Structure formats: C-alpha cells, structure tokens
Amino acid sequence: MEIFKYMEQYDYEQLVFCQDKQPGLKAIIAIHDTTLGPALGGTRMWTYESEAAAIEDALRLAKGMTYKNAAAGLNLGGGKTVIIGDPRKDKNEEMFRAFGRYIQGLNGRYITAEDVGTTVADMDLIHEETDYVTGISPAFGSSGNPSPVTAYGVYRGMKAAAKEAFGTDSLEGKVVAIQGVGNVAYNLCKHLHEEGAQLIVTDINKEAVMRAVEDFGAKAVEINEIYSVDCDIYAPCALGATINDDTIPQLKAKVIAGAANNQLKETRHGDTIHEMGIVYAPDYVINAGGVINVADELYGYNSERALKKVEGIYSNIERVIEIAKRDRIPTYVAADRLAEERIERMRNSRSQFLQNGQHILSRRK
Ligand SMILES: NC(=O)c1ccc[n+]([C@@H]2O[C@H](COP(=O)([O-])OP(=O)(O)OC[C@H]3O[C@@H](n4cnc5c(N)ncnc54)[C@H](O)[C@@H]3O)[C@@H](O)[C@H]2O)c1
Ligand SMILES: CC(C)C[C@H](N)C(=O)O
C-alpha cells in the first residue's frame, strides 16, 4: 500500500503509529478530516492478518467517522484507532495508559471512545492519562457504554427504512435477520422483540446466540446461512464488507439496516442493491446513535437531550431516502452528498482544527 498516495487520494490529514514494547502496544490512529471540529472516533482492538490490513481498517473507519459525524450534524471531524491484538488475551493496564499518553500528545485533535474489542473499563484506563476520551464510567459524569444508544438509533432508522419498503414503519410481524448479536445487536433485539418482530440470529460466539434465543425467542442459524434466510430485513451488526459479490445474490430482504460500519465491500455494491430495489439505510447514518450520545459529553452529558437527538435518526434516514428518490441515486450516494455538502460549507468558513480541544471538553465538567 502506498500510504501517502492513498492519504492524498482520500484527503486524510494524519496517520499516527504508536508503539510501546513492554505492554505490547501497537496502535494506529487515523485522523481523516477535522474541518468540522476535533476528530472523534472509537478504538477497535482486533487480530489483524497483517499490518497493512490494520492500517487499511483504521483509514476506512476514520473516513466513515468523518461522514457519520457530518451527517449527524455534529461539530466533529472523523478519526479512528485500531490496536493490533486479541482483546481476549492481550489487554493490560499499561497498554491503555500508554495509548492514553499518545492521545494526550495530539492535544485534542483526536478524541477516542469504544469500538469492537474495547470496553468502558479500557476507556477509564485511557482517562487516567488524558481527558480526550468519551464513554468512560458514568461516575465521571460520562455517558458510559454507547452500545444501547447505538441500538436505539438503529431501531429508529430501521423503522424509517421499513416505512419506505413496506408502506408502514411498524415492525410487528416483520422477520429480521441479525448478523452478530454483540453489544449493539443484543439491545436492538430487545427493541424489535418488544415491537413483535420475529428474529433470526447468527454469531461466531455461541453464547451470544443462546442469549438471544433464550431472551427473545430468536431462531439461530449457521454463520453463512444468514444471507439467504427468508426475511424482510437484513441487519448486519458484526464487522464490515458483508454486502458483496458473494452475499448479494443470496439476499431475500427488502431492507438492509444494521449497526456495522462499512457494510458495502465496495461502493458498486451499493449500486447493485439499489438496482435490486432494496432499501439500504446507509451504515454511518443509521449507526450514529453511539457517537451522538458520547458527543453530548462535550456539552455536559444530558441523557434526555442525547436520546432526543438519537431519535432523529428516523428523520435522517427519511431525508436520505428523499434525496435518493429526488436525484435518482442510491441512498449511499445521497448520504455522502449530505455529509460532503456540510463539510464543504464549513470548509469555506473555517480551516483545519488545530487548536487545543480543551475549551470543548471543559464544558463537561
Ligand atoms: N458499539 C457501538 O456503539 C457502535 C456504534 C456504531 C457502530 N458500531 C458497529 O457495530 C458493529 C457491532 O458493534 P458492537 O459494539 O456490538 O460489537 P461487538 O463486538 O459487541 O459485537 C459484534 C458481534 O459480532 C460477532 N461476529 C464477529 N464476526 C462475525 C461473523 N463473521 N459472523 C457472525 N457474527 C460475527 C461477534 O462475535 C460479536 O458478538 C461493529 O461493526 C461496530 O463498529 C458499534
Ligand atoms: C461511539 C463511537 C464514538 C464509536 C462507535 N464505535 C462508532 O463507530 O460510531
């Protein structure tokens, strides 16, 4: 991978490699764009096949956060971190504290939070070294784990997409196939079950599957069966790139609406599902609940205010669908336009975010 060429092509601002031998820290912080404000995005811990795969993931996820934050109307840019390692075996206190010092060194250009493989406890360790972290324990006046709020946003966005596909936003009796029943999807299952939807689930973690079966009467299927099951809605809630050449021909769903980041393997897959008449709720619009929630900390966290904003994901999805229909374009293109237009407008009145972010974070005290 020619890194500078890639960064230039997609307008990345900064890539930071963090290494600390003793605790075994190998982290990559990618800052995509800070036109709207400091880059806010989670820290993912994952066992990558190669360093190149880790760099690519950090870059793709950071760009996704730029678009997510812009489309959600937040005054934040986009960034993300990946820590290379197995979250079940390789974590230790010194690792997250060392990482916290690297974040502090960026002086507010990047603010972190949870993502796959990290927890509120990890964020608390980072907080020992820096204030530029959100989603720490509520005892610190923070919003805590963002996943239940992300789930609520996905539920709201799913209803808006269902309205377009089925003429009603009621999910009662609808069959929803959920891929990955982790932190977000478990909470999503709760909302769907309460509304009377029928759930089909899969996960590589058998315990997670059993919990959904026991708690919500979900039907369990094998990992690769989830694409071809008879369902109304496919909800990708594990990792990215699951909408691709292999899976699209198997899909029976009329709606795709889930929590995972970077769901389309390539943009052309968004064109294909559009041509098939599938209503696709763009990933970064529907899964913005978590970041909307943690971003509220920057104003002094108020859970009611944050939830009200997250409820608005319903109208954000409606708006994207409206633009897509008006301009005869796929929904993923409509979402990109929405985000890019906002960034462009702000770029013309403001330059890169380079000053210390302290003035924003001090509001939460
Ligand atoms: N947590 C949040 O607030 C939040 C916010 C926005 C987006 N997201 C995205 O949503 C997705 C889920 O996040 P989460 O916090 O619930 O993560 P999680 O790690 O708690 O859950 C993911 C689940 O997917 C399962 N999984 C992994 N690979 C799988 C596969 N091939 N097939 C089936 N299951 C598989 C895992 O075992 C796990 O149970 C991620 O893509 C994340 O980036 C999360
Ligand atoms: C809570 C957020 C800052 C991070 C979250 N994992 C996301 O992708 O949106």
Image (cartoon, helix red, strand yellow):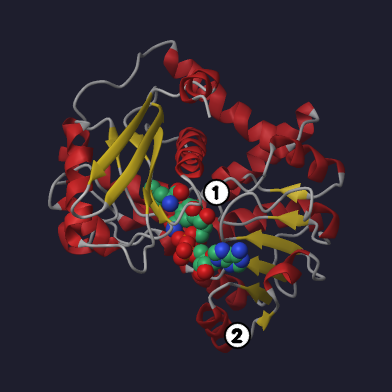
The answer to whether 208 is drawn above or below residue 38 in the figure is below
- Secondary structure under tag 1 reads loop
**Dot 1 or dot 2, earlier in sequence:** 2
The answer to whether 180 is drawn above or below residue 257 in the figure is below
Tell me residue 251's x, y (percent): 81, 59
Q: Is residue 309 visible?
A: no
Tell me residue 27's x, y (percent): 33, 44
Q: Residues within 10 Å of mark 2 (few under 14, many from 20)?
A: some
Tell me residue 31's x, y (percent): 38, 31
As drawn, the label of residue 75 is: none
* Residue depicted at 79% across the width and 68% down the height: 231
Depth check: 117 or 88 in front?
88
Q: Residues within 10 Å of mark 1 (few under 14, many from 20)?
A: many
* Residue depicted at 57% across the width and 72% down the height: 204
Q: Residue furthest bottom?
A: 214
Depth check: 70 or 51 in front?
51
The type of residue carrying mark 2 is Val
* Residue depicted at 67% across the width and 44% down the height: 265
Please indicate whether residue 354 sits to the left or right of residue 48 in the image: left
The type of residue carrying mark 1 is Asn
Q: Residue furthest top?
A: 348
In which image quadrant can residue 220 be found? bottom right
In which image quadrant can residue 260 be found? bottom right
Tell me residue 127's x, y (percent): 17, 51
As drawn, the label of residue 261 is: 1
- Secondary structure under tag 2 reads helix
Circle 2 residue: 213
**Cβ of mark 2 under 8 A from ligand 1:** no
